[in-house]
Amino acid sequence: MAMACLYTGYFGIKEISDIAPNQSSKAVRMNLAPIHKFKILLCNLLSSIFVNAILIGILLLYLICVLKIDFGDRVLLVILTNFVGIITGIFMGGFIGSIVKKKEETKVAVYISTTMFCVFLAGMMAVSIKYWIREYLPFVSYINPANLITDAFYSLYYYESLNRFWLNIGILSIISAIFLALTFCIIRRQKYESI
């Protein structure tokens, strides 16, 4: 589920491409409209969050109803983790889409590479990596979105206390806000000689 949350970043990349006039004719039309670019971006990102929340909800229903995975009495916290993970993935994709000044395919390649590196550092490919990072580079585990999402799920499963869970959700929320703010700053400064 953590990877499904992070791969929502494709939507963020698409939204950035849709408002960059040097990327598509649709973006040219959107930039000629008398609407602030941030409003357009925010509305597009919110619609992406809504669509992906439905898709992750279907995944969760499949896990519960078909595969009979029991999430216990913390299903609402699992839903919250997925929702914050979706937001982080989309805003991260938007950030990468705004800093990479190439075609959409290149942006997607950079996003996949970044996400897979985060997934590797989170121990989703080899569990020993997660413990090595936690022991020798603990700061990385607190800035890695993949690690924060998986750690939120682990904390719901293994611990009675929700302190670690709320710490992960809080850090993910801060990272999401930083991605959104940086994306807006980068997009706001982009100027084009002619549209």
Image (cartoon, rainbow, N blue to C red):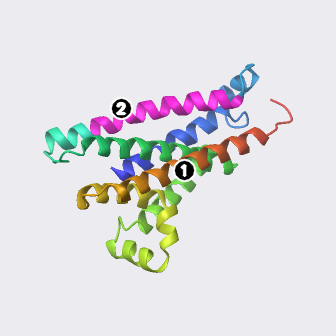
The amino acid type, in three-letter code, at marker 1 is Ile
Q: Residue furthest top?
A: 34
Query: Was residue 40 drawn as part of the magenta stretch in this picture?
Result: yes
- Mark linked to residue 174: 1
Q: Residue furthest right?
A: 193
Residues packed near mark 2 inside 10 Å, few (<14), some (14 to 19) or many (20 plus):
few
Position of residue 8 relative to residue 46, above or below, is: below
Residue at 84% x, 31% y is 194
- Precedes in sequence: disc 1 or disc 2: 2
Secondary structure at numbered mark 2: helix
Q: Which residue is mark 2?
A: 54
Which of the pair 66/110 is nearer the observer?
66
Residue at 42% x, 74% y is 134
Query: Was residue 27 drawn as part of the magenta stretch in this picture?
Result: no
The amino acid type, in three-letter code, at marker 2 is Ile
Which of the pair 175/190 is nearer the observer?
175
Instruction: Please give the range of residues in magenta.
Output: 37-59
- In the figure, residue 31 lies in which quadrant? top right
Residue at 49% x, 61% y is 144
Main SS type for the magenta part? Answer: helix
